[in-house]
Image: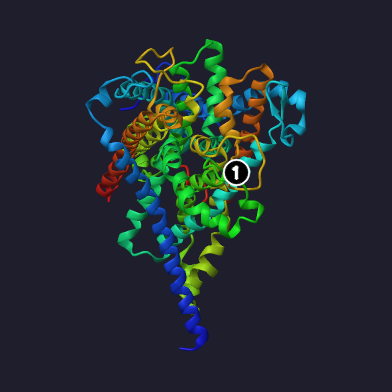
Amino acid sequence: MTTLPIEPPAATQPARPVTPGRPALLGRNTGDRLYRATLTALALVLPLLLVTLLAELVVGAWPAIKRFGVPFVWTSVWDPVAGVFGAAPMIFGTLASSLLALLIAVPLALGVAIYLTEFSPKWLRQPIAFLVELLAAIPSVVYGLWGIFVLIPFLRGYVVPPLRAVLGWTPLFSGVFYGNSLLAGGIILAIMIVPYIAAVSREVLLAVPSSQREAALGMGATRWEAVWTAVVPYGRAGLIGAVILGLGRALGETMAVTMVIGNRHDISLSVLQPAYTMAAAIANEFSEAVTDLHLAAMFEVGLVLFVITVIVNACARLLIWRVARGTAVGSRAL
Amino acid sequence: MSGRSLRRHVTSGLMTGLVAALSFTAVLALVLILGDLIAKGASSLNWDFFTKNPVPTGQTGGGVANAIVGTGVIVGLAALFGLPVGVGTGLYLAEYGSGRLGWVVRFVADVLNGTPSIVIGIFAWTWLVRPMKGYSALAGSAALAALMVPMIARTTEEMVRLVPHSLREAALALGYPRWRTSLRVVARTALAGIVTGCLVGVARIAGETAPLIFTALGNQNFTTNITQPMQTLPHQIYEYATGPFEEWHRLAWASALVLMGLVLLLGVTARWAIRQRHGAAR
């Protein structure tokens, strides 16, 4: 029936007198107290995990923090042999690829959410929502595989040549295109975060009271005007939360990005050039760290990534909770 | 109809068309990816693929039996560690989670849900790989367990909260203690939902690669020894996809199709199960 090891109440234990101000039934039974204690102990695992994770990252990174200080985040030299480490290219690559992904994913995901809540015929809602959510079920490494063998050849053959012909003169599209690039990483990330942003946005839009919609329609607004002037502004905080949640996903995504972004310690404005992300660097170099300082630098990269994603996720949660209070919106895996 | 009104209605129609088109673009991405998986992977699926181990580099043939078994072992172990903690935390949140600690746990669960899995890998490396002086399947399982706990805690909480208060009150009125009410009435009523959440959680971690790279590592040979490095399907796909050989790429697509099938089977079963249950409840 259940996996929890719950002992039957010991009958000999005297019942504790009820404290004034507490509900009469609470904590009187030994079994109840034991049950509550067990569940509380299990629930404390998560906060403990978070604290140890943070502590361990700081301890592991300490030699690098002491050695390089704050300039670690804006130095762009990464030389394990000479023992000089700066994470600027990875931080740049992480932010650039995530922003590029948001640029593509936000219109798509908001489109899906608005279409599903406001316009689509009823019979189409469940199937489309299900299919879009299935995108979240595809393992990261499968996205990477698809990126290497389908997306990159497609970009090389059909997207990049016309793009360069028109925009090749700008610094954003300069240089030779080898395939593995910021562009490929950004597109893969975009496909990966669409289901998250869409699912949360949809929950947020569903939480908007229909009186808002009806009032706008009653004033003579067209259906789109009702959505754009009444529904979307009402859920704005939640929608921003959804986008930030997607950003959090993109920042920490590892495998797919590692496989297509090129993994080069370099800062280039051009999206056609290879780049590196913090997560990709950890995946590639962590177990192959040549010196203790190198390992400490990897820990520090992990720490920076962790702190950024925690801040981003915390912001997203607070914003989403403002609209859909206390719900587990977006926590669902599928 | 005046010009202004006409323009407004045309805009409305155009924007409706646009959001519909965006929705179908997202669905198209899914269809393309799944289609490529089947087109490039299905032809390599045969009896050998499931029953043989990898052959030395350069030879053709062989299978990924070691990775399939490895995924089963590592994910199974992770579920063994992770499910009790996840479900327990979820029950706590639903039963006693209205106070300050409940808020903290809920918030931490959501934050950990968004923590990069590679960082969780570092966690398992520090606590298991470094002290044991070697990569092991056990360390991989621990990392995956840590990933699934917050996910399962939140779905369990949600499912338990769906149980009507009247059921709980009826049990308490009959003189049931709270713990028995919680386990025998509330959790039991929500059991289908909790199992669904667990299945979805397992499906999610079964596809994880990043936390396994420097914990379970990977292994070209067949092993069920959890103190040794062990191969998994996601890690096998990573190695084969980034390798230089055509033969490896072929196996990578086939492995990806198998992994995708496994994940979908778990996920879709879970969704179907809950829909049946909810449909019946109404």
x and y percentages locating residue B135 in the rendered image: 49, 15
Q: Residue at x 64, y 38 (%)?
A: A308
**Which residue was labeled with disc 1?**
A273
Q: Give the vertical position of B228 relative to A24 (above or below).
A: above
Chosen colour scheme: rainbow
| Left or right: where A228 falls relative to B189 | right
Quadrant of residue A69 in the image?
A: top right
| Numbered-mark total | 1
* Observer-nearest of B221 and A138: B221
Q: Is B53 left or right of A232, judged from the image as shown?
A: left
Task: Report the amino acid beneath label 1.
Answer: Gln
Percent position of residue A154, x then y: 44, 48
Question: Can I make out residue B227 in this image?
Answer: yes
> Within the image, what quadrant is residue A56 found in?
top right
Left or right? Give the position of A229 relative to A128: right
The residue shown at (42%, 40%) is: A149
Q: Quadrant of the C terminus of chain A?
A: top left
- When the figure is inspected, residue A52 is found, relative to residue B18, above or below; the finding is above
Q: Chain of mark 1?
A: A
Residue B268 % position (x, y) = 31, 42
In the image, residue A136 lies at what x, y percent? 42, 43
Instruction: Name the one closer to the observer, B258 or A37.
Output: B258
Q: Toward the viewer: A89 or B103?
A: A89
Tell me if mark 1 has few (under 14), some (14-19) or many (20+) residues whose alpha carbon lies within 10 angstroms of its own.
many
For residue B176, say whether it is visible: no
Foreground pick, A246 / B236 = B236
